[in-house]
Image (cartoon, rainbow, N blue to C red):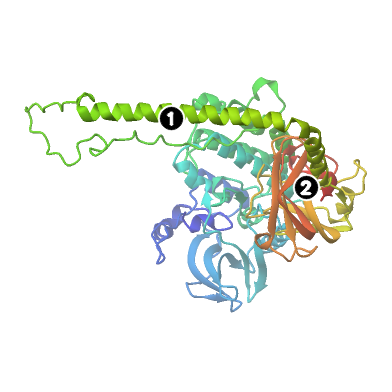
Amino acid sequence: MAERSTAAVDVADNSDDQSLTAQADQSTADGVAKNQEQETDSDAAQENTETGIDGSGKMPPLELHSGHKLARRYRLEECVTRLDGFSSWRAVDEKLRRAVGVHILPADHSRARSVLASARSSALLSDPRFVQVLDAVEENDVVYVVHEWLPDATELTALLAAGPLEVYDAYQMVSQISSAMAAAHREGLAHLRLNPNAVLRTSTGQWRIRGLAVNAALRGVSSDTPQRTDTESIGALLYAALTQRWPYESDAYGLSGLPKDIGLIPPDQVRAGVHRGLSELAMRALVNDGATASRHESPCTTPEELVKAIGEMPRIRPPEPAFTTPPEYQRTTYQQGTYGRPAPHPGVTQPVPTPPPPLQSRTGKALKWAVSALLIAALGLGSWQLADALIGQGNNADDTDKTQTTDEGDKGGNKPKPAEPLTIQGAQEYVAKGGAQSPGNVANTYDGDSSTYWRTKSFLDGPEMNPAYKPGVGIVYDLGTEQTVESSSIDLRYTGDHTTITLYATDSVGSSTPISSMEKLGSVTTTGDKAAVKVGKPVKTRYVLVWLTAMPMAPGDSYSASGYKQAITDLKFTG
């Protein structure tokens, strides 16, 4: 993936940037090609009209060059774009030794105040689904915004250049983007420039959004209906992902527009094989632009409504892994019985080997008589042993009662002890990565009240949790003293998909001990509301971690939105 396509905020080209674009598309010293965002001339003209900046009114760009340092820390490496008085760079944070992106504009630029305000507001969101703003500073008559640089991510533009997305990928994209934007709007933030260049897919399959609020501020874009604007943009992204066409007449982002004078037709009429539910969802998001929603369903005017509509759809599962059929087994010449023989000459008939004669010779007859004698002797010996066994059974008949009494006594002495419940003295939530889930409610899992519970947060991906963000969630239980743990019974709140639970023996009630150094006791996967984990080999331990790594899809409630989540109502250990 090209590094430039992973900068935190997208950038635009215009007719004045031809030489810069040609430079940016060449390979850099590290051998990674750079790709700039491509926009239509009409888009650029529309932005200039909205912002009130024409060719004569543009502010001159800052005199910056590769190697220039900001705050004696950020070393500029390569200019990505230069537009409307601001410039965007790939840079290096020499203090933390990592790649970053930087937007730079003069402090007296007409948009400098709004860019600073937007960047600082975006930085406060701290949502991992957005490319993060790291710094926003004004110094030495310069305003600059520092953001993440994701070298392992790929723009949606580049993905669509190869063809439409698979159904599951398109479903994941619109689900994650809609949920992220719904969260942003709840905090009062809008994007207003949500296009294929602003959407990235990381190497772990996660979708991230760059340029929240900042992209629009850099270009002076605003909207009286920000939620509706972002919702239509999500609909356009889904439309493009399903059809590899831009849902308007003009070409944009490397995609061909729709034919003129036919209007906005549903994706399943543009390309065969498009998923019907996703096609209708795209139209419901784009209905604000004059489309007609399929089956008379109401349009979606906010990202929150899109999230709700996605939750009402049947879940689209990932495709089954494809296995190639192994080639047919070929017998070797050795197995065919020709090893060591000369290759036959063409046209020469090979002689058929003569089978060995039957045992009619004097030696053969002697061998047959010997075998017959052995069989007769074996039958006689077997008959004698059978008779001896029957006689012995009769002699031992008087000892039957004594034998039965002895056996019953032995069985009673070796009877295993029944499993007993173990008392839980305390518990604490285990946090391997990220934030805690509901640490104040861990005691609800062993209070004996099934109406109380400990719950997780609602996650976008599932059923398996993504190790890049959250490898799992769970609780460490303290049994007071070392106890032999044999099993655990767990009552759950949500059913569906599958829930995977694993027990580990650990050395403390805290989160300092990594999972990799714990002893695994047992694991189970269930689709119901109960789980029983049996320990393969009973282990003595004081602390037991109950670790969840997969959770079902559950509807929203008063605590969290719909997503992949789980809750434990009751838990018991036996030993």
Q: Residue under circle 1?
A: 377
| Kind of residue sitting beneath label 2 | Ser
Instruction: Say above or below: 369 vs 158.
Output: above
Under mark 1, the amino acid is Ala
Residue 324: x and y, percent?
A: 42, 36
Q: Earlier in the sequence, mark 1 or mark 2?
A: 1
Q: Is residue 61 above or below residue 158?
A: below
Q: Nearer the viewer, residue 261 or 160?
A: 160
Residue at position x 78%, y 60% in the image: 541
Tell which residue pokes out farthest to the top in this image.
Answer: 295
> Which quarter of the picture shows residue 498?
top right
Question: Which is more toward the observer, 523 or 561?
Answer: 523
| Foreground of the two, 314 or 19 | 314
Q: Nearest the camera: 350 or 288?
A: 350
What secondary structure is marked by label 2? strand
Pointer 2 residue? 487
Q: Let me know if residue 263 appears in the view.
A: no
How far separated are the C-alphas under marks 1 and 2?
58 Å
Q: Between tags 1 and 2, which lies in front?
A: 1
Residue 209 in picture, x, y percent from top left: 62, 51
Look at the numbered disc 1 and give the secondary structure of its residue.
Answer: helix
- Does residue 203 appear to the left or right of 565 in the view shown? left
Residue 12 appears at what percent x and percent y? 52, 53
Residue 417 has which mark? none
Is residue 220 rendered to the left or right of residue 338? Answer: right
Q: Residues within 10 Å of mark 2 (few under 14, many from 20)?
A: many
